[in-house]
Image (cartoon, grey):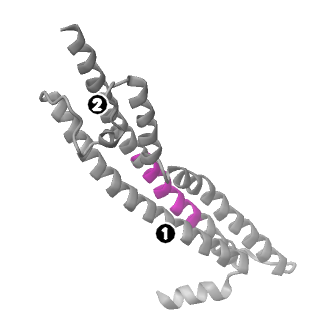
Amino acid sequence: MFDLLIDWFSKSSVVTIFVVALLSLYLLVTLWIFVYKFLFLRKWMELEKSSTNAFLHGETEVSRDSFFYNCQNRKMIKSFYEGCLEAAVKEATVGLTILSIIASTSPFIGLFGTVVGILESFSTFKEGVTLSAVAPAISEALIATAFGILVAIPAYSFHLILKRKAFEITTYLKMQINFMTSSKSDGERL
């Protein structure tokens, strides 16, 4: 396996090696963002779910674990809490743009490596070249495209998973806003 990798690098062009290195970096960044954000959002969602359940069971104050704990307003103005909600959405979606960029650009970077590899292969061929001489060069160049797609699939999938987690957190926060602001206005009516 290691010998095959060394053999591939020795036969590959500088552009192909650069493309594969860049896509490897993309893959590492994708995995790091996903693991970090997934664990962060999962913990945050558990806290907001617990805080929302406390409101459902009759609590009238914001839980210490909720995002809104540091965002309390004695007047319980809905627009104030919605401003805090925007800050929470911003925090929950940090990193998603990078995953989106990686998912959309990595296939093109891989395709660029393939095109350059094929062009370099054709420039070395002479007249009367057979398919058996062209096929290995083209298959070697196609590795860059395959690697680009290999990076794009998890980046796009992870983007959607994290986006869904952020949406769920936002939903819990909106429910809490409704509980906090309705309890004040309902109390005034009674």
Residue at 49% in and 69% down = 28
- What mark, if any, has residue 176 been given in the picture? 2
Residue 125 in view, yes or no: no
Q: Is residue 149 above or below residue 178?
A: below
Residue 119 in the image, given as x and y percentages of width and height: 79, 71
Q: Which residues are magenta?
A: 146-161
- What mark, if any, has residue 28 been given in the picture? 1
Amino acid type at circle 1 is Leu
Residue 5 in the image, given as x and y percentages of width and height: 54, 85
Judge the density around disc 2: few (<14), some (14-19), many (≥20) Cα neighbours within 10 Å. many
Chief SS of the magenta region: helix
- Relative placement, left or right, of 54 versus 139 is left
**Residue that extends furthest to the left in the rendered view of this protein:** 57
Residue at 15% in and 30% down = 59
Residue 181 in the image, given as x and y percentages of width and height: 30, 22
**Which residue is nearer to you in this view: 123 or 52?**
52
